[in-house]
Image (cartoon, rainbow, N blue to C red):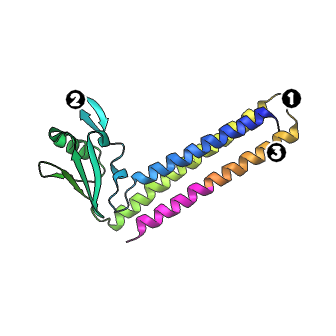
């Protein structure tokens, strides 16, 4: 097989793998009624005038199945952390006792479960679109290569399609697992 085709296939596989990992991270942020520190990932706290990730201004831990706890590294960070969680609009209400912040994770009602499944499905569809775009771009690059036999182009396109199908199947499997986790009472 031509080295340039091999390189394009490896690059495509890399991009598809990254898309799957990104999708997995996005699913982790969708809460399913259980306390998990990943729920708070992506929240930025104002720290001396610059936004910092929450886990860099406090220790996030799980107290029990329905409660997260944040131990700020500095006591004066309690109010900014609470504000950041409220502004993140993730449906959580932090409570503090002056030393630590507790975040009770409310049980999900049926309507909220449906919204979360819809959100997960949307994330899955975005990931599939990204993978299909990688397929499209790779096939176009392969077709534009000079001096490559037509059979080699066809074989490469089949390999790209197989890669695409495998990655989409991974996404579907991950979505189904998340859907079961969300709808489980």
Give the mark, 1 or 2, whose residue is nearer the N terminus.
Answer: 2
Give the mark, 1 or 3, whose residue is nearer the N terminus.
Answer: 1
Q: Residue at x 31, y 43 (%)?
A: 55
Left or right: 13 as drawn, with respect to 18: right
Q: Kindly report the distance in space between the C-alpha atoms of the residues bearing marks 1 and 2.
A: 59 Å
Left or right: 168 as drawn, with respect to 109: right
**Mark 2: secondary structure:** loop
Q: Is residue 83 visible?
A: yes
Give the mark, 3 or 2, whose residue is nearer the N terminus.
Answer: 2
Which residue in the structure is indicated by mark 1? 147
Magenta span dominant secondary structure: helix
Q: Kindly report the distance in space between the C-alpha atoms of the residues bearing marks 3 and 2.
A: 57 Å
Provide residue 102's location: percent of width, then percent of height: 21, 54
Callout 1 touching callout 3 (CB < 8 Å) = no
**Mark 1: secondary structure:** loop
Callout 3 touching callout 2 (CB < 8 Å) = no
Mark 1 residue crowding within 10 angstroms, few (<14) / some (14–19) / many (20+): few
Which residue in the structure is indicated by mark 3? 155
Question: Camera-side residue: 143 or 20?
Answer: 20
Q: Residue at x 18, y 50 (%)?
A: 100
Left or right: 98 as drawn, with respect to 101: left
Query: Which mark identifies residue 48?
Result: 2
Provide residue 23's location: percent of width, then percent of height: 50, 49
Q: Which residues are magenta?
A: 169-185
Q: Quadrant of the C terminus?
A: bottom left
Asked if residue 182 lies in the magenta stretch, the reply is yes
């Amino acid at each position: 097989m031509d080295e340039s085709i091999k390189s394009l296939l490896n690059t495509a596989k890399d991009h598809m793998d990254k898309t799957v990992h990104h999708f997995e991270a996005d699913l982790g942020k969708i809460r399913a009624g259980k306390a998990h520190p990943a729920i708070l990932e992506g929240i930025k706290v104002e720290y001396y005038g610059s936004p910092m990730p929450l886990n860099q201004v406090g220790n996030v831990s799980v107290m029990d199945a329905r409660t997260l706890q944040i131990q700020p590294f500095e006591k004066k960070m309690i109010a900014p952390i609470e504000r950041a969680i409220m502004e993140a609009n993730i449906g959580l209400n932090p409570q503090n006792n002056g030393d630590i912040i507790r975040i009770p994770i409310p049980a999900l009602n049926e309507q909220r479960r449906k919204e979360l499944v819809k959100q997960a499905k949307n994330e899955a569809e975005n990931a599939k679109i990204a993978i299909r775009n990688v397929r499209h771009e790779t096939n176009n690059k392969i077709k534009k290569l000079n001096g490559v036999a037509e059979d080699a182009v066809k074989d490469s396109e089949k390999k790209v399609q197989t890669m695409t199908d495998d990655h989409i199947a991974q996404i579907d499997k991950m979505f189904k697992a998340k859907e079961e986790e969300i709808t489980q009472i």
